[in-house]
Amino acid sequence: MDGNGRWAKRRLLPRIAGHRQGVESLRRCIRACAQRGVRALTVFAFSSENWNRPEDEVSGLMDLLAKALAREVAELQRGGIRLLFIGERRGLPARLRQGLAEAEAATAQGAGMVLNVCFNYGGRWDIAQAAARVAASGEPVTEIALDRAMALSHVPDPDLLIRTGGEQRISNFLLWQCAYSELFFSDRLWPDFDEAALDEALAAFVARERRFGKTSEQVARPSA
Ligand code: IPE
Ligand code: MG
């Protein structure tokens, strides 16, 4: 979800105003995805590297998450959405950690869409923590064992990965899981990413041929 800062700057507003608008955009996107039958939505809210931002922006983002939780959990419950936080909990303020655990518990029965919010997350962190867990278990280090130990093992690998804000890079998002994801880069800043922009990404996804290493003939006729 990239582009909040630039959205604010264009309006001569402080960066945190862009992040606040980013929360609104996320609400809209969650609703739109649920309506379109998306089973799992994973968003990148705060990266392992975002700690390097100015202190007031970091604390502003923590604050924004705590406030959004207090406001939105009931709505997620009503929508049958199961909320999970993915990332390193240690290092987050204790009160926020408790808020995350409470929000997860409150939505645990949600049988509709799964919403993974990656917070204090990095793709490399996930691979390393999975490797450490497999090593500690004494199990052989295989792709299957690592896959099971990854923080997102409860959902399939993403079919579609969307990055907003015009940048064409992965920036330490789902490094392990995006091996065969279709990538879609949107020039829209995240606060401007609306239903029409989502539908544009979904239409592009539907038009792609996914071969997973096979030939075009094989995927057209699965027996070939
Ligand atoms: C949001 O956008 C990403 C977060 C870390 C919350 P940015 O804050 O990176 O926005 P730009 O790239 O400065 O526009
Ligand atoms: Mg950015």
Image (cartoon, rainbow, N blue to C red):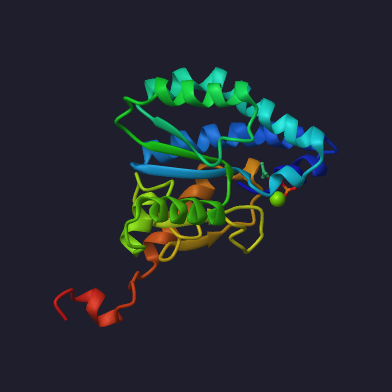
Residue at 34% from the left image edge and 64% from the top image edge: 142
Q: Vertical placement of 28 versus 68: above or below?
A: below
User: Do we see residue 4 in this rendering?
Assistant: yes
Q: Nearer the viewer, residue 162 or 52?
A: 52
Q: Nearer the viewer, residue 16 or 63?
A: 63
Residue at 42% from the left image edge and 60% from the top image edge: 205
Q: Vertical placement of 10 versus 186: above or below?
A: above
Direction from residue 154 to residue 84 in the image, left or right: right
User: Do we see residue 17 in this rendering?
Assistant: no
Q: State the image coordinates of residue 217 (x, y, percent, origin top left).
A: 25, 82
Which residue occupies the extreme right position in the image?
Answer: 12
Callout count: 0
Q: State the image coordinates of residue 144 (x, y, percent, origin top left).
A: 31, 60
Residue at 43% from the left image edge and 37% from the top image edge: 115
Q: Quarter-wise, where is residue 182 in the image?
A: bottom left
Q: Vertical placement of 96 versus 210: above or below?
A: above
Q: Quadrant of the C terminus?
A: bottom left
Q: Quarter-wise, where is residue 7 in the image?
A: top right
Direction from residue 27 to residue 11 in the image, left or right: right
Q: Quarter-wise, where is residue 36 in the image?
A: top left
Residue at 74% from the left image edge and 30% from the top image edge: 59
Q: State the image coordinates of residue 24 (x, y, percent, origin top left).
A: 60, 31
Q: State the image coordinates of residue 68 (x, y, percent, origin top left).
A: 59, 24
